[in-house]
Image (cartoon, rainbow, N blue to C red):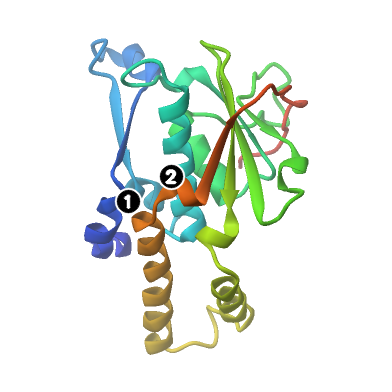
Amino acid sequence: MNNFIDDLKAVYSKAGYIRILDPHALEIGVRPGDNVVVLSLIDLGKLTGHVCPAVTSAYFIVKTALKHLSTDEIPSRENFLVAVPKYDDMALVFSYVLDAFPAPKDDPDYTPKMYLDKSLADDKENVKFVFKNIATGKTICIIWKKQIAMPLDVRKKMMEYKSNGVREKYEYIDHLEWNTFINAQVERIINISHSEMLDIQEIEYNFPGQMKMSLI
């Protein structure tokens, strides 16, 4: 069965891959060193249900975080904490890549790896995400320059389309035109210099209280 995301593999594959060790694979008999998970933007699109400018940006944010925090050639999933301004599609990307989920509300003994800090989005045009390597103690803040990833005219068009009732009022040609527009933005983000879109700072940071939410 074809997934609609497969139709754009040639575009999404340009984003490259994330290679990360998963310690849980060892529990089912995978040999040490063979427990490498390879994730692409295509994989994350299937997990989130879509590929958009935000999901694409999140992919490059976490890819950049791993590059700056890892001392090993291939980082290991259990070594990272994340702080986000809200739990949305971008945070979901971080969760899947780093196995970093908030604590469920009904499990007081769960140790979270993702934390909520709303102050990270005080500047709506320069949204912050914090990543920490538990093994080394190194912590970085990645600033996502929203005006680079999603210019104001693009955001206005997105809001206009969504406000018109995307599921009810559009014919196929409208959906096709809209999908083409969105994927043009995705491809633009893939192809731009990510040093323009992201600032990276090494910081001291105290992770806030547990982020409690239901994942059901």
Give the mark count.
2
Asked if marks 1 and 2 touch (Cβ < 8 Å), the reply is no
Q: Quadrant of residue 134?
A: top right
40 in relation to 21, above or below: below
Quadrant hosting residue 59: top left
- Mark 1 burial class by Cα count in 10 Å: few <14, some 14-19, many 20+: many
Element marked by disc 1: helix
Q: Position of residue 94 (x, y in %)?
A: 51, 38
Query: Which quarter of the rendering shows the N terminus?
Result: bottom left
Is 147 above or below relative to 100? Answer: below
Label 1 vs label 2: CA separation? 13 Å
- Let me know if residue 96 appears in the view: yes
Considering only vertical position in the picture, is 1 above or below 43? below
The circle on residue 60 is 2
Residue placed under numbered mark 1 in the picture: 42
Q: Residue at x 42, y 20 (%)?
A: 70
Residue 26 relative to residue 207: left or right: left
- Residue 121 position, x and y percent, is 72, 48
**Closer mark to the observer between disc 1 and disc 2:** 2
Of 93 and 145, which appears nearest the observer?
145
User: Dividing the picture into quarters, in which one does residue 111 lie?
Assistant: top right
Mark 1: which amino acid?
Answer: Ile
Kind of residue at disc 2? Phe
**Residue drawn where x is 38% and y is 52% of the image:** 46
Q: Is residue 181 above or below residue 206?
A: below
Observer able to see residue 1: no
Question: Along the line of sight, which residue is nearer the eye, 115 or 151?
Answer: 151
What is the x, y in percent for residue 60?
43, 44
- The spot of residue 124 in percent (x, y) is 70, 55
- Nearest to the observer: residue 16 or residue 42: 16
| Mark 1 or mark 2: whose residue is earlier in sequence | 1
